[in-house]
Image (tube, helix red, strand yellow):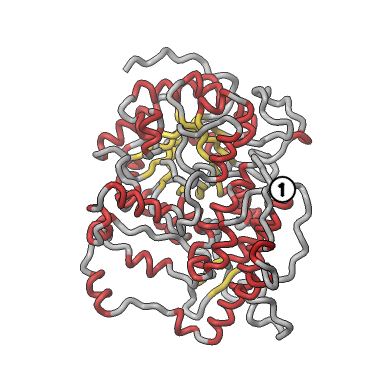
């Protein structure tokens, strides 16, 4: 590999462990996700962390395409909104008045923050990074995206055979940015190859490496379990001052400490686990201190209520994104409330929208158009968050499917229906809790006990299972289970349909997402970017 001669970095900056400690030594990391780790979702996730421990959570932006980010101000302003005036040109460090700061990277509410790019041109990457460096703590290079579009565009995990290019990409930022550069990678075929790969990335100037314990081919029904032992191997073989984040297998809060213990990593990153449960990083309240947002069953298992999390999300949209006070809201229902006039049930609330009107005059949903990355992400976020609830209440699913980014009245309607549905669930649980206990039968217990950890997801399903109104992870079937069911022996069309079903919650959002439609309408087709919600790396 032809290594360029080093030149002094621009300005004085902390790197490596000194940098990590300067941002609070975060142990919990919210992953970069395409169009889904945007400002409002980051703030929602941060809202469950106490102010005293806020520095223990680091968040990443969605992955941005380096070249597209540099080409037009329109693309930048559609996806990254750190100042009210927009990013028409790269701002100078220290030249931005505090009053001009807007959402992304706002030092009062959205730090620490890393901005992630995919790229295959050092010059494009540096130019893109120069736009964002005043608004973040570090710039991250995506070396983990395994999607076919990354192969076509030659970025993400499909750079891992081109070590010379990777070195130049990282080193360019290391030498010329005022903030550190970090990288997110996948493991290679062997531990030894992965170690040499990590050493190269670090030698180029990466201050932190995030290691996803899956290979490039592990995606869709082939995802399987992440291999924490490889991350542990890197921890043992790399110098102790190396900062390592572990990624993979984080479905619930308990997995965070388990991963830290098994890998000895400095921090743990959650991606899909956070999409389904944005409270994943929060410590559960003590018994007796649940309040109205947290529910705990008679078996001691619990979680945050979907209506409570949805309500917080809506209030963040009103307050931060739209700059207005949220609507006045009644306290969330809990079974110990005094008996009064009951609110509408979910079914009654749905019927009340159209009752007495002929089909032609039923209320139409707003055609409000928006380019806000926060407003456009609402519907896909809510399908992830409400997955078990809308599987049971298909009327809520249908109303949500018709709700469009920017139409806050439509989403307020969905929230009202969700609150009514959760109330019904709480009342039903109090009346007959036995129906919510779903132990494995004796045959399943015997069968699953004989299987290795990487052959069965039943234990994970059992550990993660909560009533349908509680936030909970989506547990993917493991490859051997998919094979047994025939999922991996289907034809190409069948496999695509099955893979889509595992990502698109109830297959109610076919075709392009709202984000993709808006970008295409404004002359910015996204053929070079992965689909919305895909976890890249």
Q: Is residue 242 above or below residue 254?
A: above
Q: Is residue 241 visible?
A: no
Q: Quadrant of residue 372?
A: top right
- Judged left or right of residue 133, residue 158 is left
| x and y percentages locating residue 64 in the rendered image | 52, 34
Residue 363 location, quadrant = bottom right
Task: Name the element at disc 1.
Answer: helix
Say whether residue 379 is visible.
Answer: yes
Residue at the location (69% across, 54% down)? 408
Vertical arrangement, residue 33 with respect to residue 366, above or below: above
Along the line of sight, the residue nearer the viewer: 127 or 242 = 127
What is the x, y in percent for residue 20?
Answer: 52, 38
* Residue 492, above or below 256: above
Which residue extends farthest left?
450
Q: Position of residue 234 (x, y in %)?
A: 33, 40
From the viewer's perspective, tell me whether residue 237 is left or right of residue 307.
left
Q: Nearer the viewer, residue 362 or 405?
A: 362
Instruction: Determine which residue is flagged by label 1.
Output: 320
Drawn side of residue 90 relative to residue 115, left or right: right
The quarter in which the N terminus is drawn is top left
Please tell me which residue is depicted at 42% across the width and 55% down the height of the picture. Answer: 250
């Amino acid at each position: 590999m032809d290594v360029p001669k080093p030149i002094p970095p621009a300005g004085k900056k902390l790197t490596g462990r000194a940098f990590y400690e300067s941002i609070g030594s975060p142990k919990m990391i919210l992953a970069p996700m395409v169009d889904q780790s945007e400002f409002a979702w980051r703030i929602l996730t941060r809202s469950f962390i106490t102010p005293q421990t806020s520095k223990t959570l680091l968040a990443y932006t969605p992955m941005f395409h380096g070249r597209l980010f540099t080409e037009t101000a329109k693309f930048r302003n559609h996806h990254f909104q750190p100042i009210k005036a927009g990013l028409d040109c790269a701002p100078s460090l220290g030249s931005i008045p505090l009053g001009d700061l807007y959402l992304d990277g706002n030092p009062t509410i959205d730090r620490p923050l890393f901005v992630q790019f995919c790229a295959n041109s050092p010059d494009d990457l540096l130019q893109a990074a120069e736009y964002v460096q005043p608004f973040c703590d570090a710039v991250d290079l995506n070396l983990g995206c395994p999607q076919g579009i990354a192969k076509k565009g030659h970025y993400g995990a499909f750079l891992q055979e081109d070590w010379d290019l990777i070195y130049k990409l990282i080193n360019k930022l290391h030498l010329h940015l005022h903030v550190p550069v970090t990288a997110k990678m996948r493991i290679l075929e062997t531990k030894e190859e992965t170690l040499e790969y990590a050493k190269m990335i670090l030698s180029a100037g990466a201050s932190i490496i995030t290691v996803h314990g899956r290979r490039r081919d592990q995606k869709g029904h082939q995802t399987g379990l992440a291999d924490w032992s490889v991350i542990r191997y890197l921890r043992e073989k790399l110098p102790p001052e190396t900062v390592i984040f572990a990624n993979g297998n984080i479905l619930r809060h308990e997995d965070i400490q388990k991963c830290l213990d098994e890998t000895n990593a400095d921090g743990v990153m959650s991606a899909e686990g956070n999409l389904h449960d944005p409270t994943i990083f929060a410590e559960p309240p003590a018994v007796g201190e649940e309040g109205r947002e947290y529910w705990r069953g008679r078996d001691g298992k619990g979680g945050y209520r979907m209506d409570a999390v949805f309500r917080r999300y809506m209030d963040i949209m009103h307050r931060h994104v739209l700059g207005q006070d949220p609507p006045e809201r009644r306290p969330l229902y809990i079974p110990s409330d005094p008996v009064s006039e009951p609110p509408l049930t979910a079914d009654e609330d749905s019927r009340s929208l159209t009752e007495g009107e002929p089909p032609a005059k039923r209320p139409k949903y707003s055609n409000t158009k928006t380019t806000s990355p926060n407003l456009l992400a609402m519907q896909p976020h809510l399908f992830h968050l409400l997955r078990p609830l809308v599987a049971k209440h298909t009327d809520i699913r249908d109303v949500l499917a018709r709700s469009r980014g920017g139409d806050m009245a439509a989403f307020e309607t969905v929230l009202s229906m969700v609150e009514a549905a959760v109330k019904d669930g709480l009342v039903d649980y109090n009346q007959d809790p036995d129906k919510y206990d779903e132990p494995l039968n004796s045959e399943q217990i015997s069968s699953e006990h004989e299987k290795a950890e990487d052959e069965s997801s039943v234990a994970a399903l059992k550990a993660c299972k909560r009533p349908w109104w509680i936030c909970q992870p989506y547990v993917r079937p493991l490859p051997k289970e998919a094979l047994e069911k025939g999922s991996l022996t289907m034809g190409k069309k069948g496999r695509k349909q099955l893979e889509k079903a595992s990502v698109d919650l109830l297959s109610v959002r076919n075709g392009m997402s709202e984000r993709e439609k808006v970008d295409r309408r404004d002359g910015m087709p996204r053929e070079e970017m992965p689909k919305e919600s895909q976890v890249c790396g």
